[in-house]
Amino acid sequence: AIRMTQSPSSFSASTGDRVTITCRASQGISSYLAWYQQKPGKAPKLLIYAASTLQSGVPSRFSGSGSGTDFTLTISCLQSEDFATYYCQQYYSYPPLTFGGGTKVEIK
Amino acid sequence: QLQLQESGPGLVKPSETLSLTCTVSGGSISSSSYYWGWIRQPPGKGLEWIGSIYYSGSTYYNPSLKSRVTISVDTSKNQFSLKLSSVTAADTAVYYCARIRAVAGGSLNWFDPWGQGTLVTVSS
């Protein structure tokens, strides 16, 4: 199974900050990567697929990059509604489909 | 707008079988462009894919759960279901159903949208 490792697992940031979350795959996955946002008590929401394609309706302050084994999710100007946990997911090789362990973005 | 809704018992006894159904509304489960799947999340932990099914009945399962999982589809009711046998406390989780984008050849991709989730507790 492909293991997805996110870093950091959590961090604090302020509104207006530029933040970057990293996801590393245990083997190359080309661009077969998605990012999700999950708020407490809610289901995950798709933000980005194919590593860098923004899902319809997602604000443009979110962006994704990377290919192979290293990927990043960037929020260019953190808003109050962006405080949440973010997960990456690979769909290059399955079963199983696998998720990263999550990165929690907290208010500083 | 496509919506998914999980339903089933919130409490299951150890060694018994967990059974959940996902009802799809606002679209057809028989679309050739999508698979349908189950994902779970233990309290305070991350996401684990359980398995996925196509409207034709073709399935993929997580090898770590394969011996205990059965996913089925009922196109007449626009529903798909999960059965997880021999449950233990480790199976306590929020269970989500979701649509999975698929491409020609049945390749699974990303999950969107998701149901709201349902908490299943395994306890005597």
Image: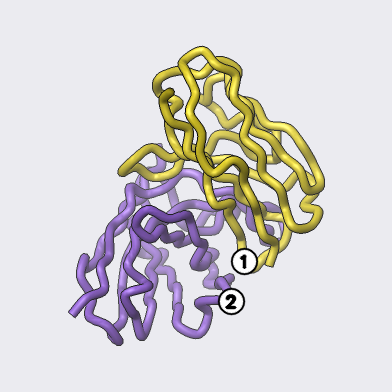
Chain colours: A yellow, B purple
Q: On what subunit does the disc labeled 1 rest?
A: A
**Residue with the mark numbered 2:** B63
Q: Foreground residue, B99 or B31?
A: B99
Q: Which residue is denoted by mark 1 in the rendering?
A: A96
What secondary structure is found at the residue carrying circle 1? loop
Out of B17 and B123, give the one closest to the viewer: B123
Q: Nearer the viewer, residue B1 or B62?
A: B62
Image location (x, y in percent) of residue A35 = 58, 40
Q: Is the N terminus of chain B in the top left, top right, bottom left or bottom right quadrant?
A: top left
Specify the label residue B23 is tagged with. none
Residue B41: percent from left, percent from top? 41, 58
Task: Find the distance from the CA under tag 2 to the CA under tag 1.
Answer: 7 Å
Task: From the viewer's perspective, tell me whether residue B45 is left or right of residue B109.
Answer: left
Do the CB atoms of the residues marked 2 and 1 lie less than 8 Å apart? yes
Q: Residue at x 46, y 15 (%)?
A: A15
Residue at point 77%, 37% (across, down): A66
Judged left or right of residue A59, residue B116 is left
Q: Residue at x 37, y 62 (%)?
A: B79
Kind of element beneath mark 2: loop
Q: Amino acid at mark 2?
A: Pro
Q: Position of residue A36 (x, y in %)?
A: 53, 40
Amino acid carrying mark 1 in the image = Pro
Q: Residues within 10 Å of mark 2 (few under 14, many from 20)?
A: some
Height in image: B51 above or below A20? Answer: below
